[in-house]
Amino acid sequence: MRPTGRLHLGHLVGALSKWVTLQDAYDCFYFVADWHALTSDFADTSQVTEYAYDNVADWIGVGLDPGKSTFFVQSLVPAHAELYVLLSMVVPVPWLERVPTYKEQQENLKDKDLSSIGFLGYPLLQTADVAMYDARFVPVGDDQVAHLELAREVVRRFNNFFGGDALVEPEPLLTSFSRLPGLDGGKKMSKSIGNTIHLSDTPDEVRKKVMSMYTDPKRVRADIPGTVEGNPVFTYHDAFNPNTAEVDDLKARYRAGRVGDVEVKRKLADALNAHLDPIRERRAGVLAKPDRLKQILFDGSSRARRVAEETMTRVRDAVKISYK
């Protein structure tokens, strides 16, 4: 996860909630992708470290346990860069140019300089991140499937070139609710756009943001039947309100013009704050012990380096660049 800002509800439904369930079934590696943060934000790196610690506090807040999984920092495992370089020797440039998000982000982030080799090659660095740990499965949203398919192609090409199975071909684990619309009704909640509710927002901040959410623009009075489908407020209810009977009742009354947007939003704010309260409490506990937070990342990075060295020993042997 790139430390480019505070984490929000989109991260929770798109990644973190899935990670929590996986930690009891697999040996999981979760990392702060600080090098990836530079692909689009190299002009200002002043907050990368701060966001790294803040993001990991959120991980623990949502229920991830460093005792069950390995938390580490990408730049503290230099072998990622070595594997990236070796993979880059066998991957054609057009493979990277055809990744859908390459042109998409160039279009969406016109205020940033994305003409660098680092930006073009970031899907290849992602491949190195995954292949380094012999990842059999990778949890992804639908917007990351193309990146993982590229990783699979790269691993196959590398193994074919150098004869063997030095790297493991990963498979996707798709999340069931991978994309949350923004508060403004945009297709995706995004910190770069600012249409987010952060996991660390206070109850008052959450309520204020919910009350300003985009809803059915044709509904100028509460007695006018409204549209539920595609309405962000109800999408959030479906994602975060555990009282399904209440949600069904609100939907029925909304369609019939018997409930106003204010009531629907108030109930959503209540549900969101009930969901976020324990996350905020655990997060505060972690941030109250900054030395412990640092140690979690240092210990995890140490373990990651040991595993990475095992992989790189195989890779160097396969490439036949191994000085013993």
Image (tube, rainbow, N blue to C red):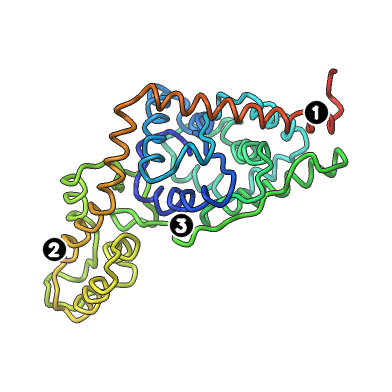
Distance from Cα at disc 1 to Cα at disc 2: 62 Å
Q: Is residue 45 positioned above or below 106 on the image? A: above
Task: Give the camera-side residue of 204 and 113.
Answer: 204
Q: Residue 216: horizontal and vertical position, in percent?
A: 24, 67
The residue under label 2 is: 262
The quadrant in which the C terminus is found is top right
The 10 Å Cα crowd at callout 3, few under 14, some 14 to 19, many 20 or more, is some
Query: Would you name the residue on which mark 3 appears?
Result: 178
Residue extending furthest bottom?
Answer: 256
Circle 1 sits in a helix, a strand or a loop, which is it? helix
Left or right? Give the position of 292 relative to 250.
Answer: right
Earlier-in-chain disc, 3 versus 1: 3
Badge 2, how many Cα within 10 Å: few under 14, some, many 20+?
few
What residue is rendered at 40% in x and 45% in y?
63
Spatial distance from mark 3 to mark 2, Cα to Cα? 27 Å
Residue on which the image places disc 1: 316
Which kind of residue does numbered mark 2 sit on? Val
Residue 261 placement (x, y as % from top left): 16, 66
